[in-house]
Image (cartoon, rainbow, N blue to C red):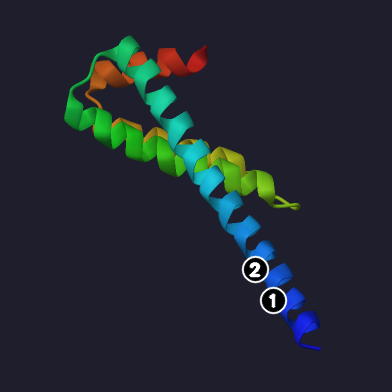
Amino acid sequence: MKKVIALCFFALALFLGSQTISAQTSIIEVNKKASERTEELRKFIKFDDNQRNQVYAAYQEYMQATLDLKQVSVVEEGVKEKINKLLDDKIRTILTEEQYVRFKEFTKD
């Protein structure tokens, strides 16, 4: 009986461990994509370190939201557009008007 209980606890620990690894992998993936996108944008627009950190944070939120959206089976209509608009609004507040115009050119590609 003790072996059965120990086996059940072991199986539960494996299950919980796999969930944690999955969550850590998605966080790493989000950070990687946000970093890549920020650096691509920085090469195109040329902004300072403070703006880079703010743009990176905005892209982290955006990437996390799109990842969460992919994991949901039923998505309301217009949610993707709302996420894109939130990113656009945040970027608009971070960048200057000239930089924002270049950002719009960058996102058309």
Residue 27 is situated, as x and y percent measured from the top left of the image, at 49, 45
Between 40 and 92, the one nearer to me in the picture: 40
Amino acid type of the residue that numbered disc 2 sits on in the rendered structure? Ala
Residue 26 is situated, as x and y percent measured from the top left of the image, at 55, 44
The Cα atoms of the two marked residues, 2 and 1, are separated by 6 Å
Side of 99 where 29 appears, left or right:
right
In this figure, which residue is indicated by the disc labeled 1?
Answer: 9
Extreme residue in the bottom direction: 1
Residue 13 is situated, as x and y percent measured from the top left of the image, at 64, 68
- Using the rendered image of the protein, determine whether residue 43 is visible from the camera's viewpoint: yes
Between 20 and 66, the one nearer to me in the picture: 20
In this figure, which residue is indicated by the disc labeled 2?
Answer: 13
Residue 16 is situated, as x and y percent measured from the top left of the image, at 63, 65
Image: 62 above or below 35: below
Q: At numbered mark 2, what does the secondary structure look like: helix, strand or loop?
A: helix
Classify mark 2: residues with Cα within 10 Å, few (<14), some (14-19) or many (20+).
few
Q: Are marks 2 and 1 in contact (CB under 8 Å)?
A: yes
At a point 50% along the width and 15% down the height, the residue shown is: 108
Q: At numbered mark 1, what does the secondary structure look like: helix, strand or loop?
A: helix
